[in-house]
Amino acid sequence: MFESADLDHKVSKEEYKREEPKLREALLNAQFDLGAQKDFAVLIIIGGVDGAGKGETVNLLNEWMDPRHIVTYAFGPPSDEEAARPPMWRFWRALPPRGKIGVFFGSWYTEPIVNRVLGKCTDNDLQKYLDEIFRHEKMLVDEGVLLLKFWFNLSKDQQRKRLKALESDPKTKWRVTKEDWRRFKVYDRFREISEHALRETSTAGAPWIVVPGADPRFRSLTAGRILLEALKKRLAEGERREKRADAVPPMPQLDNLRLLRSLDMTQRLEKKRYEKLLERYQGELNVYSRSKKVRKHSVILVFEGWDAGGKGSAVRRITSALDARQYRIVPIAAPTEEERAQPYLWRFWRHVPGLGGITIFDRSWYGRVLVERVEGFCSQADWMRAYSEINDFEEQLVQNGAVMFKYWLHITKDEQLRRFKERQKTSFKRFKITDEDWRNRDKWADYEAAVCDMVDRTSTEISPWTIVEAQDKPFARIKLLKSLVEKFRTL
């Protein structure tokens, strides 16, 4: 992949002086159009060989373009806060919103490539990480992000000359360290690993662009023109850009037999038995939540279910057994303007707890395959690919030590109607019932199908769904608490 980039490409001073002002003006115009349309975000990944002009290019982009709408993040070793969460967490937090340009100087490629070069991980470890990157970038592109990946290249001889030239100049000598020369000694190994990483992750939607870095003028014009052409092309596409589903839609149930209809909704728990079990399981939950074993993990609870299904009261029975300093409840409503300007999962990544923390989601990322699917708030392509994106998201959480609990609280349509009417009659419960709740009842069959598809496609061995028969609230609460305690026992 680097053969052409190894050549001594050059641009004369005269040509650079002639072309640079025109390129700057065109880039600024494209940037203003991007800010006006706000149809997509631009993310520029900067990687490559030491001394190939990565830093100079980043500085140049900030000089050529409006700095108010371009943000650069330089990623070094993770902080303690970042290390307590999945590796992708810090990159998700830095994603640019629609209408903006983000530059990642150092990215999700840096650590796996360097670790493999230094022998800190195996080929299998590297490949696993590259597979995760592949899926992550596909998700970003599918969400509309214009992803540009620049790899700045120097041949081994060019890098040696570059380092010596910087070292011989008193003004730039400080830029060359012993670490740079140590890395130069493993140039061949670095090139081999990097070439493999680029080959595995260069796709139609997010191809790698290898830029020769020996001549600063050639490098600058090349990177600038590629960015300009990519911006102009996407801006011209506008709303004509197609979205396609990568999977066959869920199969219709020919016999009308669905998971939710197979549940035994007659299960009940009498009051004395309920009170005894409630005290027992809340006590055990309190002890486990403070144990060293559980504190080595993060705990994530996801609550989904029918309107009036009892999610709120179930959450209260759990939190009353916990230290208030230990947990956080995240209620999920319609996305804000800030959240709509980002890829769908962004607003959930920002709430991922660190090790030792407990986060309870009252509704969650599953809205994409439930409400948004049924109400038509997103395209079929969006909700169809969301199944695999959600599975990837949860796998990253579990790999980083999260213990996942996902609950669907199920009631019958008749029971929901009874609870709705009860809420209307009770003054302090009226706020719980809205016109939207009544409208959703008209689409009960559509939601039922969506729930069954959701469970089938996202109940995995590492993050299974627990379906809770919630017709009887005491029975549902004890089933929830019991499942938590039994899981903590096995840690």
Image (cartoon, rainbow, N blue to C red):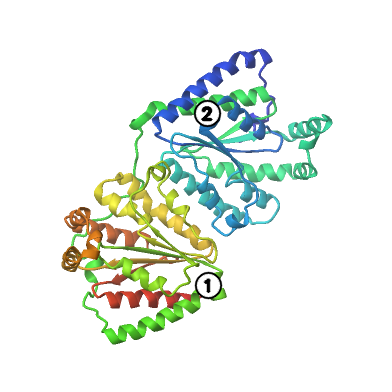
Nearest to the observer: residue 259 or residue 342:
342
* Residue at the front extreme of this rendering: 427
Q: Name which residue lies at 52% across and 44% down.
A: 94
Mark 1, Cα crowd under 10 Å, few <14 / some 14-19 / many 20+, is: many
Of mark 2 and mark 1, the one earlier in the sequence is 2
Please provide percent x and percent y for residue 354: 53, 61
Q: Name which residue lies at 58% across and 25% down.
A: 64
Element assignment for label 1: helix
Q: Which dot marks residue 294?
A: 1
Q: Is residue 406 left or right of residue 172?
A: left
Q: Is residue 438 visible?
A: yes
Q: Name which residue lies at 55% across and 70% down.
A: 295
Q: Name which residue lies at 38% across and 76% down.
A: 481
Element assignment for label 2: helix
Please provide percent x and percent y for residue 411: 23, 68
Q: Which dot marks residue 409?
A: none
Please provide percent x and percent y for residue 400: 54, 61
Q: Is residue 475 left or right of residue 300?
A: left
Nearest to the observer: residue 13 or residue 414:
414
Is residue 490 shown above or below 171? Answer: below
Nearest to the observer: residue 33 or residue 147:
33
Quarter-of-image position of residue 142: top left
Q: Residue type at mark 2?
A: Leu
Image mark count? 2
> Looking at the image, do the residues carrying marks 2 and 1 touch, with CB atoms under 8 Å apart?
no
Mark 2, Cα crowd under 10 Å, few <14 / some 14-19 / many 20+, is: some
Q: Is residue 256 visible?
A: no
Q: Residue type at mark 1?
A: Val
The CA distance from mark 2 to mark 1 is: 48 Å
Please provide percent x and percent y for residue 311: 31, 66
Q: Nearer the viewer, mark 2 or mark 1?
A: 1
Residue under numbered circle 2 = 227
